[in-house]
Image: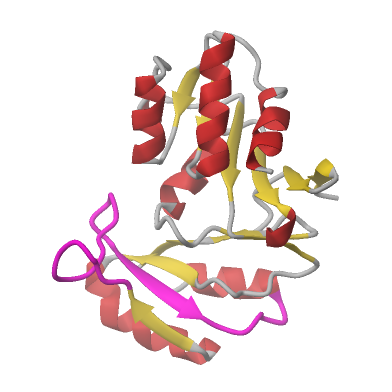
Amino acid sequence: MKQKCAEEAFKLVKDGTVIGLGGGGTVSILVGLIAQAGLSVRVVTPSTRTAALCAEHGLPVLPTWTVDAIDIAFDGCDELDGSLNALKSCGGIHTNEKIVASLANEYVLLADESKVFAALPFTHPVVLEVIPEAKALVEKRVQAFGGAAAYRVSGAKDGFTVTDHGNYLLDMQIAPPDDLAAFHEALLHIPGVVDTSLFYRVAARALVAGPGGVRQLTRG
């Protein structure tokens, strides 16, 4: 299904453009398709793995800070609802992903049917990128939302997982909120929270792969 989804995404890539690419298996396949077709594109990506893969395929990668516009961007997600709100929690690079999404004229999510729901089930955590000085403050404030919260620790070294910006990642396991917009705004207003892995009204289109093919969702 990832192959089918990548092939549909490839149809949206135009020669001579700047494209955004996130991470994940579908994006990796898309990189190969672009290189195989010999398209002249420049890539902006928040993913170290995707950047390395692009380099292997001879696709030039631009530093995000040098770019003020992206023609189209593609990324995967962990959960997606009918309004194209999404959770992107596993990679821990959501702040940079949102920067790429904001730069894009169109931001397209790639998913399979198992990740699509009428409403986000919040099976995956909501992840907050937190400035270290606000560690205790944020941990206390999120208690008001119920559930459980814990800072992500590294499996490769002793201590907390640290983002590209030197911040911590707080994983919140909660029940689906009644008001998604209010929940999103409340999190962003906690001092020390840089951004969250909840992509609320960010994507305009999604390509969803299933046994019957790939269907397209658009935000109404």
- Furthest toward the left, the residue is 158
Can the viewer see residue 162 in this picture? yes
Quarter of the rendering occupied by the N terminus = top right
The residue depicted at 46 percent of the width and 24 percent of the height is: 43
Residue 201 coordinates in the image, percent (x, y): 69, 54
- Vertical placement of residue 78 versus 158, above or below: above
How would you classify the magenta stretch by its main secondary structure? loop
The residue depicted at 58 percent of the width and 40 percent of the height is: 26
Pick the front one: 119 or 24? 24
- Vertical placement of residue 20 versus 192, above or below: above
Residue 97 coordinates in the image, percent (x, y): 48, 46
Can the viewer see residue 65 in this picture? no
The residue depicted at 86 percent of the width and 50 percent of the height is: 220
Question: How many callouts does the rendering have?
Answer: 0
The residue depicted at 71 percent of the width and 24 percent of the height is: 12
Residue 84 coordinates in the image, percent (x, y): 73, 54
Please say which color scheme the image uses: secondary structure
Judged left or right of residue 119, residue 185 is left
Report the magenta residues as a range: 152-179
